[in-house]
Image: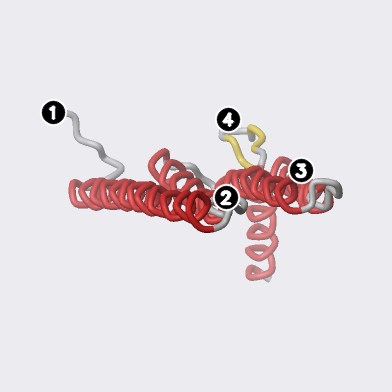
């Protein structure tokens, strides 16, 4: 048996336990989402068929909750895959939230006021913010190979430079 020198057996157990618990919480969330969505759809169809022929309102809670399920699942995948640094996780969450919230807003827009595309405004401004977030991540966190062959981000290099300045001041 090959031993992992980076983690103790207890640490590996805790990581595995956390992953199993997190995966179970996602499965429970998806299961409850499906059951409640089916119940709401049934209620909405009974209402439309027997009481008042109105719009299927069930799409609003369905897609709103679906965003929560997507983000919960994304959080699990990012955790399970060990995505670091935290800034990379931020890019992933920001992108997922943008995509699914914008789809939701366009669904609301098309079912409420289809003649006026108001959802284009959050698409433009939030989209610009997402582009800026990605550029900042690439500029600040993208690594370069240093003299020893290690990859270090601009942030890590700036921290080392600042530490060197502090060491010099302490010697004086």
Q: Residue at label 1?
A: 1
Q: Mark 1 packing: few (<14 Cα in 10 Å), some, or many (20+)?
A: few
> What's the residue at 32%, 46% (across, down)?
27
Q: Pick whichever of labels 4 and 2 is earlier in the sequence.
A: 2
How far apart are labels 3 and 1 at the CA level?
Answer: 45 Å
Q: Nearer the viewer, mark 4 or mark 1?
A: 1
Q: Residue at label 4?
A: 149
Question: Which label belongs to residue 56?
Answer: 2
> What's the residue at 68%, 46% (across, down)?
107
**146 or 35: nearer the eye?**
35
> In screen coordinates, is 136 left or right of 24?
right
How far apart are labels 2 and 3 at the CA level?
Answer: 40 Å
Instruction: Provide residue 63's location: percent of width, then percent of height.
Output: 55, 49
Q: Pick whichever of labels 3 and 4 is earlier in the sequence.
A: 3
Judged from this view, the residue extending furthest toward the left is 1
**41 or 166: nearer the eye?**
41
Q: Mark 4–mark 2 contact, CB under 8 Å?
A: no
Instruction: Provide residue 65's location: percent of width, then percent of height.
Output: 50, 54
> In screen coordinates, is 52 left or right of 158?
left
> In screen coordinates, is 138 left or right of 114?
left
Q: Quadrant of residue 171?
A: bottom right
Q: Secondary structure at mark 3?
A: helix
Q: Pick whichever of labels 3 and 1 is earlier in the sequence.
A: 1
Q: Residue at label 3?
A: 135
Q: Mark 2–mark 3 contact, CB under 8 Å?
A: no
């Amino acid at each position: 048996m090959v031993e992992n020198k980076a983690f103790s057996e207890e640490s590996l157990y805790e990581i595995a336990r956390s992953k199993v618990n997190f995966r179970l919480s996602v499965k429970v969330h998806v299961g409850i989402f499906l059951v409640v969505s089916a119940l709401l759809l049934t209620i909405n169809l009974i209402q439309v068929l027997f009481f008042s022929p109105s719009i299927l309102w069930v799409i609003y809670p369905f897609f709103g909750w679906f965003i929560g399920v997507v983000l919960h699942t994304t959080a699990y995948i990012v955790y399970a895959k060990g995505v670091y640094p935290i800034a990379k996780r931020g890019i992933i969450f920001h992108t997922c939230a943008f995509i699914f919230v914008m789809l939701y807003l366009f669904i609301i827009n098309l079912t409420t006021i289809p003649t006026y595309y108001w959802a284009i405004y959050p698409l433009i401004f939030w989209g610009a913010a997402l582009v800026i977030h990605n550029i900042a991540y690439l500029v600040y966190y993208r690594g370069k190979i240093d003299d020893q062959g290690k990859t270090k981000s601009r942030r890590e290099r700036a921290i080392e430079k600042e530490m060197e300045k502090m060491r010099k001041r302490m010697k004086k």
